[in-house]
Image: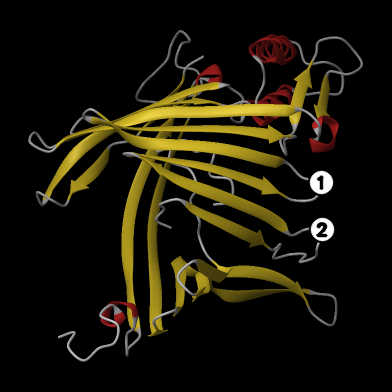
């Protein structure tokens, strides 16, 4: 009963005990890889490599609210085999192997407020700014909102200093049934970013849109040529510090509760990647270099360099998931790397387990 309480919300915002909880999950996944399925003699039953990956993960958390305007929360993660082996040098300069428990602090923070207008959080916490499902370029720094303004200071855990401390801000606005957010990120002499997100209903669909502009990029760009002497070169972040890179994504979620059907689709334009002309030039040069390796290079070395350049090198990506269908994952078309993985999805509302397939493909 709220009778006799000066603040009826006190029973919700203040607890006399500490809440402790957690979860544990186990999975076993298998994958097969075919490097070049388009050649003559391709054998589906004979993949180039295969992998079996069992996993066991757990999380333990606590949450305490001793006062209405003060909260402490922490969570810890561990995973099988629950320990990791590190090599250390002893006093005799000999290497010694030490087993250390694999327990990581996932979150540890406190919340407090000044009146009803300023809410402050200090500590290690996860923050999700993006609205995309498969891709989220606006999730710059990894709260419910209704016309709110948030500020963040992110300290470097390895080298905390003024120059390594990042600043971020986010403003959120409720426009009818839509939520609009504007955010920015700054750290001295690193990539600055500004982002916009929009999410809301459109008929039977929930749509989401993200747009990001980055000044500079931390990515290393690779270039290949068949002309000596520079068959291979790379440009680091300092070489393109003043360049601007726009990225964007848009998608929708459709849910039909009557037929127990859900579909999600998303398109992603990766501005921090190679242009179509540069990517085509690299592929043509790599093909020629693999066929006839230049002096001082081996075929395996050229292929290894090509894989570095191929990592997320496309500009156009698409992804879709539909429950009750099938699950296919295609990572990189230009190198013929294909993954086929069966999966399951749980619909907790109807207490059923349904098979699903997921499709992820480079659109270029």
Image disc number at residue 189 = 1
Q: Are marks 1 and 2 in contact (CB under 8 Å)?
A: yes
Instruction: Please report the residue visible at 45 percent of the width from the left and 45 percent of the height from the top.
Output: 173
Q: Residue at x 21, y 29 (%)?
A: 204
Q: Nearer the viewer, residue 228 or 266?
A: 266
Q: Is residue 258 visible?
A: yes
Of marks 1 and 2, which one's residue comes earlier in the chain?
2
Badge 1 local density, few (<14 within 10 Å), some, or many (20+)? few
| Residue 42, percent from left and from top | 42, 15
Q: Which label number is shown at residue 297?
A: none
SS category of the residue bearing label 1:
loop
Quarter-wise, where is residue 354 in the image?
top left
State the SS at label 2. Answer: loop
Against 171, residue 119 (above or below) is below
The location of residue 260, given as percent across then percent down, is 12, 37
Left or right, residue 198 beside residue 236 = left
Q: Which residue is mark 2?
A: 163
**What residue is drawn where x is 33% and y is 51%?**
28
x then y, percent, for residue 132: 43, 37
Q: Is residue 100 above or below residue 350?
A: below
- Measuring from the top left, give residue 100's x and y in whole percent: 58, 75
């Amino acid at each position: 009963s709220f009778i006799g309480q000066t603040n009826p919300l006190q029973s919700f915002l203040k607890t006399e005990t500490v809440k402790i909880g957690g979860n544990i999950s186990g999975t076993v996944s298998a994958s097969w890889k075919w490097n070049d399925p388009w050649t003559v003699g391709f054998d589906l039953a004979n993949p180039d490599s295969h992998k079996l990956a069992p996993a066991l993960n757990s999380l333990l958390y606590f949450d305490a609210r001793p006062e209405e305007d003060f909260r402490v929360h922490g969570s810890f993660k561990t995973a099988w085999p629950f320990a990791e082996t590190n090599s250390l040098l002893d006093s005799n300069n000999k290497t010694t192997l030490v087993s250390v428990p694999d327990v990581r602090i996932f979150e540890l923070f406190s919340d407090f407020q000044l009146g009803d207008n300023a809410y402050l959080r200090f500590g290690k916490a996860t923050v999700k700014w993006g609205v995309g499902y498969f891709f989220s370029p606006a999730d710059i720094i990894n709260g419910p909102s209704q016309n709110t303004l948030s500020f963040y200071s992110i300290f470097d855990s390895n080298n905390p200093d003024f120059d390594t401390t990042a600043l971020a801000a986010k403003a959120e606005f409720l426009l009818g049934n839509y939520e609009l957010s504007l955010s920015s990120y700054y750290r001295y002499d690193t990539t600055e970013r500004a982002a916009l997100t929009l999410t809301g209903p459109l008929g039977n669909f929930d749509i989401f849109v993200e747009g990001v502009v980055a000044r500079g990029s931390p990515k290393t760009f690779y270039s290949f040529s068949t002309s000596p002497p520079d068959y291979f070169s790379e440009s680091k972040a300092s070489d393109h510090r003043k360049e601007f890179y726009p990225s964007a994504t848009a998608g929708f979620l459709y849910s039909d509760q009557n037929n127990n059907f859900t579909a999600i689709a998303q398109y992603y334009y990766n501005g921090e990647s190679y242009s179509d002309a540069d990517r085509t030039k690299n592929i043509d040069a790599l093909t020629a270099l693999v066929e006839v390796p230049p002096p001082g290079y081996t075929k395996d070395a050229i292929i290894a360099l090509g894989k570095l350049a191929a990592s997320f090198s496309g500009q156009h990506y698409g992804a879709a998931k539909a429950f009750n269908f099938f699950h296919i994952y295609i990572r990189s078309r230009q190198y013929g790397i294909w993954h086929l993985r069966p999966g399951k999805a749980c619909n907790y509302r109807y207490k059923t387990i349904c098979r699903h397939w997921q499709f992820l493909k480079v659109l270029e």
